[in-house]
Amino acid sequence: MSKVYIPKQHHFDRSADLLVERAEDAPGDLLTTRQVADWFQVSLQWLQIGRSRGYGPPFVRIGRRVRYPKGASVQYLKARLYQSTAEYTSETEAADQL
């Protein structure tokens, strides 16, 4: 089985706390891929590739449609909040050993 490449850092890591603040008003909303891409300031392709490779925010399928629960997306961002680069480095090193 080939090893799946999961990026260690994304540009929205630096602004995750601001994105969380903007989203906590309606956690039950279901967002489209385009809405999440705009919110996270990433490309549609990044989200699509992330879904197929197993990284990125949690999503649900409703028929053929893909939706992102807003609350789960906020939790995804909160999990990416760090106080220092040392925290991030130690976590990614531990993930690399898996």
Image (cartoon, rainbow, N blue to C red):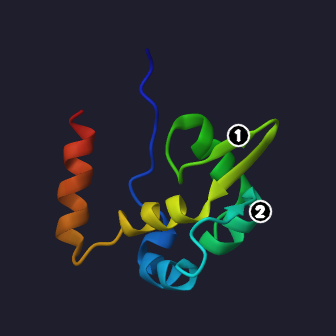
Q: Please give left or right for residue 33 compared with residue 39 in the image.
A: right
Q: x%, y% of residue 41? A: 64, 72
Residue 69 in the image: above or below residue 50: below
Q: CA distance from mark 1 to mark 2?
A: 15 Å
Location of residue 14 (image quadrant) = bottom left
Query: Which residue occupies 43% across, 70% down?
Result: 13
Label 2 belongs to which residue? 34
Give SS at disc 2.
Answer: helix
Quick one: 7 or 73, which is closer to the camera? 73
Query: Which residue occupies 44% across, 43% down?
Result: 6
Instruction: Classify mark 2: residues with Cα within 10 Å, few (<14), some (14-19) or many (20+).
Output: some
Q: Earlier in the sequence, mark 1 or mark 2?
A: 2
Mark 1 or 2, which is nearer the eye? Answer: 1
Task: Quadrant for the C terminus, please.
Answer: top left
Give SS at disc 1.
Answer: strand
Label 1 belongs to which residue? 61
